[in-house]
Amino acid sequence: MRRSVERVTDQNIRELRSQMEEVLFESGSITEHLRHVARDADYCLLLSDATGIVVQGYADTSASREMAEEGLATGSRWSESAIGTNGIGTCIVSRRPVTVAGHAHYNHTLKGFTCTAAPIFAPDGSVMAVLDFSGRSVANSSECSFAQHIVRQAAQSISTALFRKCHQNSCIVALSREPEAMPLALNALVATDETGRLLGATQDALSFLGVAELADLGGLHIQDLWRIALDELKPLSSHNVRLSGTDGSNFYVTTFLPKKKTRSSSAPSGKAQQKARSNFKSEPLELDRVAGSDPKMRRNVELCRKLLDRDIPLLLLGETGVGKDTFARAIHLESNRSQKPYVAVNCAAIPDTLLASELFGYAPGTFTGGLKAGRVGKIAASNGGTLFLDEIGDMPIDLQAHLLRVLEEREVSPLGASAPIPVDVRIISATHRELPQLVEAGRFRRDLYYRIKGAQVNISPLRERSDIAELVQRVIEDEQGAEGAEIRIAPEVHDLFASYRWPGNIRELRNVMRWILSVHSDPVITLDHLPEELLARPENPQRGRVHLASDAASEPPADATLEHACERIEREKIIDALTVTKWCITAAAADLGISRATLHRKIRKYEILSPNQKV
Ligand SMILES: Nc1ncnc2c1ncn2[C@@H]1O[C@H](COP(=O)(O)OP(=O)(O)OP(=O)(O)O)[C@@H](O)[C@H]1O
């Protein structure tokens, strides 16, 4: 198979580099060191993003520059889908270090190369970059294993540095099999809050604990793992405390306490630091913080609190990015199951063929190529706690029958197992789809629909929330961390936020704020700081929209019903208030006795145009 290596544009590279500023920053001194090694061996050193595009390539000898010209260079695209089996692309898919030598490359034009690549993990366990050492094909296996060793170590150190930075305000527990002279150099790290609740773990720590993925530790405490409270591990003098695992083997832990939190008054600290957070899930919020002060969301919280410890399945409905997972997590944290696992499964993100084994698990020896010891499914893993089934509308129909049995009989049958396992799980499901329509179309089982919908909670889209300003503030604090400077939002930005449609909801808001904080360091955010797309969107009536107030389409329908009559009167009142106050939103809102956000929503709803928007 011959296909030349694709190259993305310089503009793309710049954008990718700016998105990867944190990895580039953290990997700086390590790649500098590797560069010397690469130069001595006539190798190219490449750093790619999570999709396989090289954002930084080093070729420091004439031999390696030749290879760069053949494709091993900044901007080249090495995803498996683009070029078949290769070092970087295969490493991304397999999530582990790989060497692809000579003819093992799918693309014949690459058969002259040997490429060794290792993944750099984000603190949430996703692959965020790949480090690759590529040279001319060699027969010498010791050269290969040297390259493997050095690339793996480097990628691991960068992942650990990112993890430490992300969890700089948490307790870090370092794990080792032997008492370590330098626990700071360890890569097996677990982060906890001050009560010992697990917040994250590096890939090495997951292997150390024999756990497949971070989600499997969700909701657990240190005490659940080792029957010892964090307080007993806390003092700095407690280096190399010896503990015993459940299998009786000894290991050693050293605990590092977080730095004291301070609030700096200077401009935002390092952009790189803000970027780091962009890849991490934020810490769980309690229900009150999730709901903010929005009245509908507050009513949702009241309802959920009444049902908190009742065995009633909840169905959360809402557009993408409104915070369904965040809400479900908050319910779990407030319930009497909070000490037990919270396990989230996105039914749309897992291929249908894998979803059954993911949910129900499988018995030892069920699949060729499966784990020898079998696999505990997510349902059993959430025993005692909460199982969040996101995008349940996308669950294949045959699995729906299986899930229904779990709900009705409270036991799960792993694939290939002879006996079911009893489970006690609270199910919270979520979807952005219209389940009744799917039921009518025969794509969702009616009986399952009624089973999961013990109570239904509609999570409001962001454009309908009255507390956008509060959310903005929370997101800023989240993104900046404790060290962040005070940031103010100009009133016109609040106005624009209140009138924007936010199709991606809080996720989009978070991305917008992340972008602003990464690119600008001014203490006040004004319209000039906003991304162009936000200002130019047609949904945003503050700019660029050409529309006549007298346009028939914008008129509410005739007063056929009381509701329509009220709407017409409301619209007129608003136009009057805006005219009298010369479109000063604050004054008009005060005159009308409503908040500015509500006024903006109504202006949008009734498509009322300011004088300078009319043609
Ligand atoms: N109340 C909130 N305050 C601050 N950030 C929030 C809040 N709710 C959600 N977020 C943030 O918004 C983003 C999307 O949240 P989440 O994943 O919970 O949404 P979702 O509705 O489950 O999305 P999807 O439908 O795509 O699965 C996350 O980054 C989350 O941290």
Image: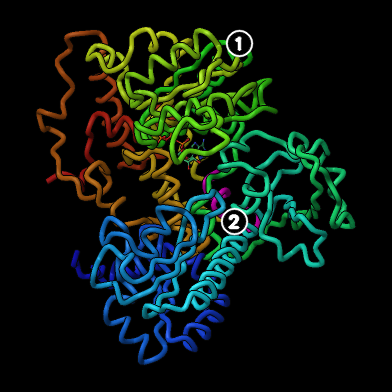
Q: Give the residue type at disc 1.
A: Arg
Left or right relative to 56: residue 241:
right
Residue positioned 29% across, 33% down in the render: 603
In the picture of the structure, the residue carrying the numbered disc 1 is 310
Question: Which residue is at the front of the view, 27 or 61?
Answer: 61
Q: Quadrant of the N terminus?
A: bottom left
Q: Secondary structure at mark 1?
A: loop
In space, the residues marked 2 and 1 are separated at their CA atoms by: 42 Å
Q: Residue furthest left?
A: 552
Name the image colouring.
rainbow
Counting from the top left corner in percent of width and height, residue 39 is at: 47, 87
Element assignment for label 2:
loop
Can residue 38 be found in the magenta stretch?
A: no
Image position of 131 with respect to 541: above or below: below
Residue behind mark 2: 486
Q: Is residue 539 above or below residue 431?
A: below
Which residue is nearer to you in this view: 305 or 74?
74
- Residue 96: % across, % down: 49, 57
Q: Are marks 2 and 1 in contact (CB under 8 Å)?
A: no
- The answer to which quarter of the image holds residue 592 is top left
Amino acid type shown at disc 2:
Glu
| Residue placed most toward the observer, 97 or 343 | 97
Q: Quadrant of residue 525?
A: bottom left
Q: Please report the bounds of the magenta region as a residue range.
A: 473-486
On whether ligand 1 comes within 8 Å of the CB at mark 1, the answer is no
Query: Is 291 left or right of 400, judged from the image as shown?
Result: right
Earlier residue among tags 2 and 1: 1
- Residue 304: x and y, percent? 56, 17
Query: How many other residues sit within 10 Å of disc 2, few (<14), some (14-19) or many (≥20)?
Result: some
Task: Name the outermost residue toward the bottom.
Answer: 62
